Structures are given as C-alpha cells and as structure tokens.
Amino acid sequence: MATEETTSETETETESAPDPADSESEPAPDLVEAERRAVHEVELGLEWFQRAQGQLLAFHHATGHGMDHLREAERLLRESGRDDLADNVRDELLPHGVVDDDRWSYDVVENYQRTLLAEARGLERRVRRELTGGRRHVAERRQERAWKERSDKR
C-alpha cells in the first residue's frame, strides 16, 4: 500500500509541477477546431471528476464525524444506564458500512480514485500529449490572447 501512496503522491506532484510547454509565450499547437474543443472537453471532464472527488472526501469526512457523535452517544447512553440502546449503537450502527453494509466511505473514495478518476487522468494526459504536445488549457490560452488583442486594439 505504501508504494501506491508514493506513486499517487509523485503523480500529483508531477501533474502540478509547471510544464515548460505551458508557457504563455509558446505558440499554440496547430489544431483543427474540433481537436481544440475535444481537448477542452476532456480537460473539463477531468476537472468535474476532481470536483466529484472533493465531494466524496466531504462525504467521507461527514460520515466519520457522524460516527464520532454516535460513539459519544453510545458512551452517554451506557453512562445513563441505557445499555440496550448503547448496544444497538455499538452493534448496529458503528460497524455499519455506507455501501452494502460492508464498504466504508474510505472504500468508496479509494475505489473512485483508483478507477474512474485515474482513468480520466490518463486519458487527459494522453489527449494533451498527442494533440497539444502536453500543453494545458490550450482553449483558455487562445481565448485569453484574443481578449488581450481585442483590448489592445482599443
């Protein structure tokens, strides 16, 4: 497991490191409009998947906080002599998964990261590598240049 974590951290660092091909002064690759739009759509798709990952992390943390409160409720119920209710919390709710009674929220997060998110990241890298020479945000850079040129003509 430590190897997977190290690999993930390395990939994240590599993805966030400045790419020399991302320089604003670099000319945009010669793409047909459909390619430019496709690259942009893949980048946007990945960004939405990353947002979904954030939502899953929030779900994971909220679930954990809810469980923490139930653990405290179990303690207080036992303290007040309500062992029957405390036992219900201990035996039925605290060990309960969020999916299929077995899988916990971290399982959902890890599965999402390992499958759809990882595959979308791979596709996005491949599309950029093959169509833009690795450059990111080609469509946005084009729009930025057009807006600056329009402003400069004023």
Image (cartoon, rainbow, N blue to C red):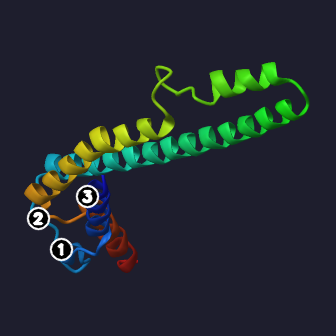
The residue that appears at 40% across and 75% down in the rendered structure is 151
Q: Amino acid at mark 3?
A: Thr
Which mark, by number, is residue 133? 2
- How far is disc 2 from disc 3 in space, using C-alphas? 29 Å
- How far is disc 2 from disc 1 in space, using C-alphas? 8 Å
Quarter of the image for residue 88 reads top right
x then y, percent, for residue 145 = 30, 71
The residue that appears at 51% across and 43% down in the rendered structure is 55
x then y, percent, for residue 137 = 28, 62
Secondary element at tag 2 = loop
State yes or no: discs 2 and 1 in contact (Cβ < 8 Å).
yes
Q: Amino acid at mark 2?
A: Gly
x then y, percent, for residue 41 = 27, 46
Q: Which residue is mark 1?
A: 21
Q: 85 above or below 114?
A: above
Mark 1 neighbour density, 10 Å: few (under 14) some (14–19) many (20 or more): some
Q: Which residue is mark 3?
A: 3
Mark 2 neighbour density, 10 Å: few (under 14) some (14–19) many (20 or more): some
Q: Earlier in the sequence, mark 2 or mark 3?
A: 3
Q: 16 above or below 153?
A: above
Pick the front one: 103 or 83: 83
Secondary element at tag 1 = helix
Q: Earlier in the sequence, mark 2 or mark 1?
A: 1
Secondary element at tag 3 = helix
Quarter of the image for residue 107 reads top left
Pick the front one: 14 or 10: 10
Q: Earlier in the sequence, mark 3 or mark 1?
A: 3
The residue that appears at 91% across and 31% down in the rendered structure is 80
